[in-house]
Amino acid sequence: MVGIARDSRQQAPSRGKGFLRTLCSQWQMMLMSVPMLLYVLLFNYAPMWGWANAFLDYTNKRNVAKGITPWYGLENFKWLFSRADFIQSIRNTLAMSVINLVFGTISSILLAVLLNEVRRRNFKRTVQTVTYLPHFLSMVIVVSMAQNIFASTGPINQMLISMGAVREPVFFLGEGKYFWWLVGVINVWKEVGWNTIIYISAMTAIDPSLYEAAAIDGAGRFQRILHVTLPGIKSTFVILLIMNIGHLMEAGFEIQYLLGSSLVRDFSTTIDIFVLEYGTEKLNIGVATAAGMFKSVVAIILLVGANFVAKRLGEDTLI
């Protein structure tokens, strides 16, 4: 027993020395990670000191002008959740995020599977290039294109009328019931090619012998997709799903701000737009910070919760 205790005591410092040796042997990689570490600390963690504004009183403009912001406690949060427009912004954010998540994930996997089955490399590369190029377009350009396409005199309405689906043009841009789905369609068109890249990369890592064995067993192309390709990208799908769930409180800002109008305000206002309105237009920094803090805390809870569920189910996890 004494010998075992001595061995355990001797192993502790050796582990520490082993860790230091690893750091010393990989000092180039450690040095390369310093700029990114400083970037994260400066732009992600340092601004968190501003969360203190959520607990200060910015309602008295005279005191704010004099630099006096007394402690306000949780009053900003109480005021937030008593506002119907803030609850509405939460609803809009979650609705558009879920639509983007579901349709974005399904379309990306479907396109990746279809491209993976293409045998002509030139055609495959051409389609992949054409589909991911919209990712690099400015959202201003994308929204301008969408406004022309979905206008009352645009090609979508002309096609619907010529097919006899509708008698009069549909007011896509002015009716709230269409706004969430319109945002989802635009996001899918813009990002589907870019999101497909990572799934195609995961498919290239699948052992080709699995496809050969399935073909020998008599599996058709669809069966090989179902039993080889999709299980092969399962871990990638789970990791991306966990990350996307962590971003459910970020439905976007640009597209809603540019495409929205007074006609669809009740459906286009997200938490980010709410923060912008109260932080810059109404100069209530306390309320704006409280709303942003709420969004961040909920995002962390969603991320940790999704990771916990995936871990309990025996899937690959992010943390």
Image: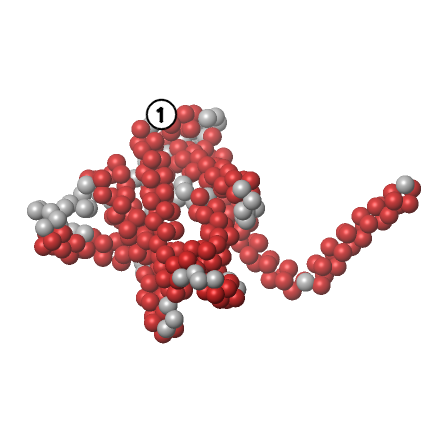
Q: Amino acid at mark 1?
A: Ser
Residue 9 in the figure: left or right of residue 141: right
> Which residue is at 9% across, 55% downward?
162
Residue 311 x, y percent position in the rendering = 56, 43
**Toward which corner of the image does residue 145 lie, by quadrant?**
bottom left
Specify the quadrant that holds the N terminus: top right
Residue 252 visible to an observer of this rendering: no
- Residue at left offset 11%, top offset 53%: 163
In percent of width and height, residue 291 lies at 41, 35
Residue under the image location 40 percent in, 64 percent down: 116
Camera-side residue of 105 and 87: 105
Residue lying farthest to the right in this orientation: 2
Q: How is the image coloured?
A: secondary structure
Extreme-left residue of the structure: 167
Q: Is residue 106 visible?
A: yes
Query: Mark 1 falls on what kind of element?
Result: loop
Residue 115 in the image: above or below residue 246: below
Residue at 39% of width from left, 33% of height from top? 287
Residue nearer the viewer, 308 or 302: 308
Q: Give left or right: position of 215 versus 85.
A: right
Number of marks in the rendered image: 1
Mark 1, other Cα within 10 Å: few <14 / some 14–19 / many ≥20: few
Closer-to-camera residue (88/96)? 96
Please provide percent x and percent y for residue 109.
39, 55
Q: Position of residue 138 (x, y in %)?
A: 31, 58
Q: Which residue is mark 1?
A: 82
| Quarter occupied by residue 63 | top left
